[in-house]
């Protein structure tokens, strides 16, 4: 496993190529992908009864999980989304509903208002730039999800599910010591359970 400068350079190059790959795939296959994702998840992954499920509010050309979050709420689960507190800190999760007021958060991303209750998720749907079938994902480089997953997993069992387009799959994601593996990856085409 490379580390230090070599790993940073490999991840930087990976991210640039992955952004381009995702943009092309999104342009060609993005229409209706959120509905396909919802259907695949609900058939493949058992959601914790009455549990707290974290999604995300999509940015740029990320696969849209909002149809899935609406379905999760309709099945009696609490839905929440991550809120960045600042660099080097874990994410916090605030209640989300389609009607919830949003405010501008860190990095200009829309997030639930500070008055929205905080939740601790049982299951997290995690965005990504790329993934492999070993369960590793490449994020945007700030380590928010890796840090958060490590902290949550130290407290209780949680299920981490990467969400991305089928076209974001690669043979191997460059990984370091602090990169957390996912339990599942779900694309617009299939659900992939990661062997432990």
Image (tube, rainbow, N blue to C red):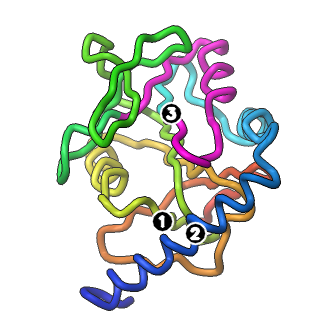
User: Is the residue marked by circle 3 packed among few (<14), some (14-19), or many (20+) residues within 10 Å?
Assistant: some
**Marks 3 & 1, CB-CB < 8 Å contact:** no
Q: Point out the image quarter for the C terminus.
A: bottom right
Q: Point out the image quarter for the N terminus.
A: bottom left
The residue located at (34%, 57%) in the rendering is 146
Residue 194's spot in the image, x, y percent?
A: 61, 62
**Marks 2 & 1, CB-CB < 8 Å contact:** yes
Q: Is residue 109 above or below residue 14?
A: above
Residue 81's spot in the image, x, y percent?
A: 43, 30
The residue located at (57%, 21%) in the rendering is 49
**Front one among 76 and 8:** 8
Marks counted in the figure total 3
From the image, state whether disc 3 or disc 1 is nearer to you.
Answer: 3
Secondary structure under the numbered disc 2 in the rendered image:
helix
Q: Which residue is labeled 3 in the image?
A: 57
Distance between the Cα atoms at labels 2 and 1? 9 Å
**Front one among 2 and 9:** 9
The residue located at (64%, 70%) in the rendering is 133
Q: Is residue 153 above or below residue 39?
A: below
Nearest to N terminus: mark 2 or mark 1: 2
User: Is the residue marked by circle 1 packed among few (<14), some (14-19), or many (20+) residues within 10 Å?
Assistant: many
Checking the image for residue 18, the label placed there is 2
The magenta span reads 55-82
**Front one among 128 and 25:** 25
Q: Which residue is labeled 1 in the image?
A: 138
Residue 74's spot in the image, x, y percent?
A: 66, 12
Secondary structure under the numbered disc 3 in the rendered image:
loop
The stretch drawn in magenta includes residue 13: no
Q: Quadrant of residue 19?
A: bottom right
């Amino acid at each position: 496993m490379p580390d230090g400068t070599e790993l940073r350079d490999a991840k930087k190059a990976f991210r640039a190529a992955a952004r381009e790959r995702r943009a092309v795939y999104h342009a060609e296959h993005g229409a209706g992908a959120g509905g396909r994702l919802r259907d695949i998840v609900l058939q493949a992954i058992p959601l914790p009864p009455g549990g707290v499920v974290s999604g995300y509010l999509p940015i740029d050309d990320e696969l849209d999980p909002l149809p899935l979050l609406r379905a999760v709420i309709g099945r009696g689960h609490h839905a929440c989304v991550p809120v960045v507190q600042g660099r080097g800190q874990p994410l916090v999760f605030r209640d989300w509903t389609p009607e919830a007021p949003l405010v501008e958060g860190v990095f200009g991303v829309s997030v639930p208002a500070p008055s929205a209750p905080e939740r601790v998720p049982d299951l997290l749907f995690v965005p990504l730039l790329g993934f492999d079938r070993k369960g590793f994902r490449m994020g945007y480089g700030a380590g928010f999800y890796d840090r958060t997953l490590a902290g949550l997993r130290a407290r209780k069992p949680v299920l981490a599910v990467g969400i991305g387009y089928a076209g974001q799959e690669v043979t191997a994601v460059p990984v370091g010591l602090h990169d957390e593996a996912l339990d599942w990856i779900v694309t617009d085409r299939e659900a992939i359970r990661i062997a432990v």
